[in-house]
Amino acid sequence: MARLVAVRKLALATGLAVALVATLGPAAGAAPDDREMVAAEQDRQATLMRDTWKSFTAMVAPETGLPSDNINGNLDPASRSAYTSPTNVGAYLWSAIVAEDAGIIGREELVSRTKKTLDSLGKLERHPASGQFYNWYNPATLEKLRVWPEDGSTVYPFLSSVDNAWMASALMVVRNAVPEVRAQAQKLLDPMDFNFYYDPAGRSPDVRAGLMRGGFWDEQPPGCSIVGNYPGHGPDVWYTCHTYGNFASETRMISYVAISLGQVPPEHYFVPWRTFPDTCDWGWQEQKPAGQFVDYMGIPVFEGQYTYRGLKFIPTWGGDMFEELMPDMFVPEVKWGKKSWARQHSVYVRGQIEHGLNDAKYGYWGFSPASNPAGGYREYGVDIMGLDTPGYTSDQERTSVDVGFEGCRDAQPLPASYGDGVVTPHAVVLALPYQPKAALAELAKLRRDFDSYGPGGFYDSIAVRSGTVAKRYLALDQGMIMGALGNLLGHDLLRNAFTKGGADKHLRPLMAMEEFNLPAHQ
């Protein structure tokens, strides 16, 4: 009976994918010759979800219920990394909810797995004054790491604002989606104080709300740090020297969580820059934006836009897909931001498609930080679609573009060609709701043209000209695949669970206020 229920749920999920593609209509990047390939890939999405879940079951330490950061492509338990982060644990928790909704696991297994993970989270050492989790733990022993297991280097225990935001997001989802453990999830969430990261004068003393710091150490680290204590309780800490100053980034999830929990003023939503202003004081940014200042709740917001190959958009920091779309897994940005994010996401995906197919001419697209096929981990993106001048580049050779900043910085010659482009399947899956046919065609091409698919779903990345594949699985990237598919095939499963309560009350009205400086139709 359980198997029959699972088959029915997976069949329903595939049907939902068909309906979504039909509803959203034609999209860039899928030629008529690709129709059969697109249809076949559409039918594989439920199987992709099931295989991706296998990678999580392989990554999890059975004694604690915590996932490792990564595992080899053969899913050998002996290859589990000896470290994990709050983001990785959060990704496992929300992926388990998706797996149950799709019929891959039963309710009893979901509750059992979730409870075990929450039990272990309750045993982890946390920063007492803020209730925040440290950034690295051993998933098997639950110890806070002070020595990096791969090379023996010293770890200075750090508390990351964005990693804790993903953990809090997962706990907010769990408390609504798994009522059997609601009290346990809430008990873990309640001490998490994001006000600890909130610098009231982060942008300027003249602006009436502040910015979020990247995080802090509770012991003095080497290098740059700032001693302080924003909420004024507990011992002083050592903050990062940077705040998160741009909005279109995965770091906006810190703001979403803190506002939803009522821990920072709502005006904070409008403080991070959409683009930096168009003066030479900001002339280091990737390109000169077009825009003007608009006032929201007494906060001056520079509503700027960048342009790439005729497309107008709000840049991320590095030009990558996970910055653009990962927060959208939890907050219905298109629904709540009809004059802002609804004008942004689809166009941003089109920019990535345009870069991969027509500018760099790789024949493939989907650029986001991922495993480096040559070893290790690296940031990838579309340089010109990010604020940072060096940017996240799309190839192994780090081919970058500098279009200059009129009146402040001269343009440099455009590259004659690009090198070995690196694409990652999680970026393509994130794009499914916004360019469905193009994304399905891309996934089908990656299956067809490379040894890109293993027992845990798509491997993490592919260098498309050399054909080198990073045959491993990362909890974060697998969690994005599970989350995106869970929303797509499960009627906004994660968004609905996250937004019940504080997000709907505190965040939704703010998103409804803003109008990005973007055309309604492009």
Image (tube, rainbow, N blue to C red):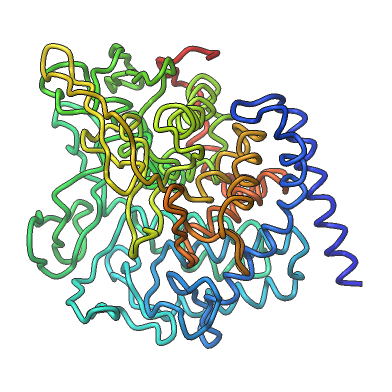
- In this view of the protein, which residue sits in the foreground, 214 or 84? 84
Question: Split into 4 quadrants, where in the image is the N terminus?
Answer: bottom right
Please provide percent x and percent y for residue 380: 36, 46
Between 317 and 498, the residue placed more toward the observer is 317
**Residue 364, position in %: x, y?**
51, 40
Q: Does residue 307 sit above or below 425 in this rendering?
A: above
Residue shown at 83%/57% (left/top)? 9
460 above or below 286? below
Q: Going 14% across and 70% down the picture, which residue do you hit?
A: 219
Q: Is residue 479 above or below residue 108?
A: above
x 56%, y 55%: residue: 450
Question: Would residue 37 appear left or right of 253 to someone viewing this image?
Answer: right
Question: Number of numbered discs present?
Answer: 0
- Identified at 53% across, 14% down, the residue is 522
> Quick check: 232 left or right of 472?
left
**Residue 412, position as x, y percentages in the image:** 17, 23
Looking at the picture, how far across and down is residue 3, in whole percent? 86, 70
Along the line of sight, which residue is nearer the eye, 68 or 510? 68
